[in-house]
Amino acid sequence: MTGARALLLLLFALATTRPVDGQATRKKTTVRAGTAARASARARATSRLKSRPAAADRTSVTPRKRARPVRRAAAPAIARLEARTPFGLDALRGDLGFLAGASIRNGSWGMMVVSLSQGDTLFSINADVPHQPASTQKVLTSVLALNSLGANYRYHTDVLHTGTLRDGRLDGDLILRGDGDPSLSSRFIGRTPDAAMDSLVGRLVRAGVRQVSGRVIGDASGFEARSIPEGWHPRILQDAYAGRVSGLTLNENLVWVTVRPTTRGSPATVVLEPATTAIPVRASVRTVAGRGASLRLGRGANGISVSGTIGAQSYQRSYSYVVEDPASFTTGAFLAALRRNGITVAGGMTLGPTPSGARPLVSWESPSLETLLTVMNRESVNVIAEHMFRAAGRGSDRHVAGSAFNSDTVLRGLLQRTVGMRSDALRAYDGSGLSQTDLVSPRAMVQLLGWANKASWGPLLHASLPLAGRSGTLRHRMMGTAAQANLHAKTGTTNDIVALAGYVTARNGELLAFTMMYNGRDRWRAREAIDAIGITLANWSR
């Protein structure tokens, strides 16, 4: 009797102490913010510096008695867009229409495909409606530069002087005259950010210059003074891919703040790369025990400040800033390189036009436009595109200052003259496609591709474009398909745009020119459609 009663009491206790629905045991997770910071620094990430404290888990759970689980209907699976193998024009149009229509829930397509071999239009959507092109704008910049400047065009950064030069002493000023050369960077010269200026100054040393009694003058008048193109969104202005534009430019107008540990208890080494006298640095970083780092960086009107600690066993930490005044930055780097290489300068630095009567001393020549074009298009380098765009509007004889307005005027005039483009089909506010005010119609883009294909420099444009499954921004796309090593085109991607413009050879050997521009929020689905369409074009025959 007693045992049975005890058993009943035990069962009752178990029944009344089960967990309340909705409550769950939460495992506490400690976020080690330093891990991400170390990885970012190790990779020398070029994203803007901004302190972002780790977000704490503030979710609270209110117990509810006898809560019933809510059954939610499973989200419908979105079918993957598969490429087709159409035969005949009607089949191609049906397949491309399906892929475009099934891919997006909002936004707008602008699309056109033309056979350059047969001369007929194979497919189009909104062919005369201008769309934002994103980085496919670089196709326009490429054509403008090749036509206006030629494949062998080179930028020249000149060093001139006033006064007299005798026995290694210059009694006068030294002038650094820029040409908007975007190749003065570690991407092209040497392996360190200081290599470009050291190479230029090395030529002065070999020319026998040892002392300068006057000043160093930086002349950036080759380009317009405006360094931020019209239409660039404020949110991108501190991102490394949005470097400023100037007639005097260095290291893609990025400066690295590098912190290196020394011995425990001693101040750490804090340097700018490339070194420049134009940006003051205030540093108070101590070397402590360990491998970690706790650093605080800030930038203001008075320069860059760095404080905190770094472990004696830590690797160096490097952070990048976008340079707001490229002309001063570059001139200051030139002055720092002069001093580093043993040339004394008595008068400091300033900015201004080259004085009349100044005589040349040495000059630095960039790689050919063909080389720069390939780097620009393969990896979608915006700073090269912006400087190339302005140089193309300036002309090979450098008769006017390079400006976005001049380049837009020259580009629209070229297309109206050569392919009969409508006056409202194009507006180019920059050369990279970052501007939100850039517009081009699918028809204008394809007309441009068709005309470029017949130009003497057409093969260079073809060769500069990323190759599906092989190179540049297309290296991981359309792999293992008929488009691989066949479709070559310029990509374009922003938060609200995905685009592709270029060439592909169909299964029957026809060369096709195409452009696909999607403006809207379904860009990942639209990108899937673009790849499926690209493969379908490679599979097509008639």
Image (cartoon, grey):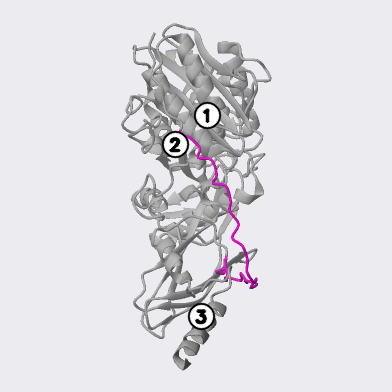
- Residue under the image location 63 percent in, 44 percent down: 228
Figure check: 387 above or below 313: above
- Residue under the image location 44 percent in, 45 percent down: 184
Q: Residues within 10 Å of mark 3 (few under 14, many from 20)?
A: few
Q: Is residue 57 within the magenta segment?
A: yes
Residue 108 shown left or right of residue 81 in the figure: right
Q: Residues within 10 Å of mark 1 (few under 14, many from 20)?
A: many
Amino acid type indicated by mark 2: Met
In the image, 254 versus 489, the foreground residue is 489
Q: Secondary structure at mark 2?
A: helix
The residue sitting at the right extreme is 424
Figure check: 269 above or below 513: below
First of labels 2, 1 by sequence position? 1
- Residue under the image location 50 percent in, 84 percent down: 8
- Residue 376's label in the rendered image is 2
Alpha carbons under labels 2 and 1: distance apart? 10 Å
Which residue carries the number 3 mark? Answer: 14
Tell which tag, 3 or 2, sits nearer the viewer. Answer: 3
In the image, 478 versus 435, the foreground residue is 478
The residue sitting at the front extreme is 1
Q: Tell me, yes or no, whether the two marked residues, 2 and 1, touch with CB atoms within 8 Å.
A: yes
Q: Secondary structure at mark 1?
A: helix
Coordinates of residue 32 in the picture (x, y in percent): 46, 72
First of labels 3, 2 by sequence position? 3
Coordinates of residue 399 in the picture (x, y in percent): 58, 28
First of labels 3, 1 by sequence position? 3
Which residue carries the number 1 mark? Answer: 141
In the image, 49 versus 510, the foreground residue is 510
- Residue under the image location 41 percent in, 15 percent down: 86
- Say if residue 455 shows up in the picture: no
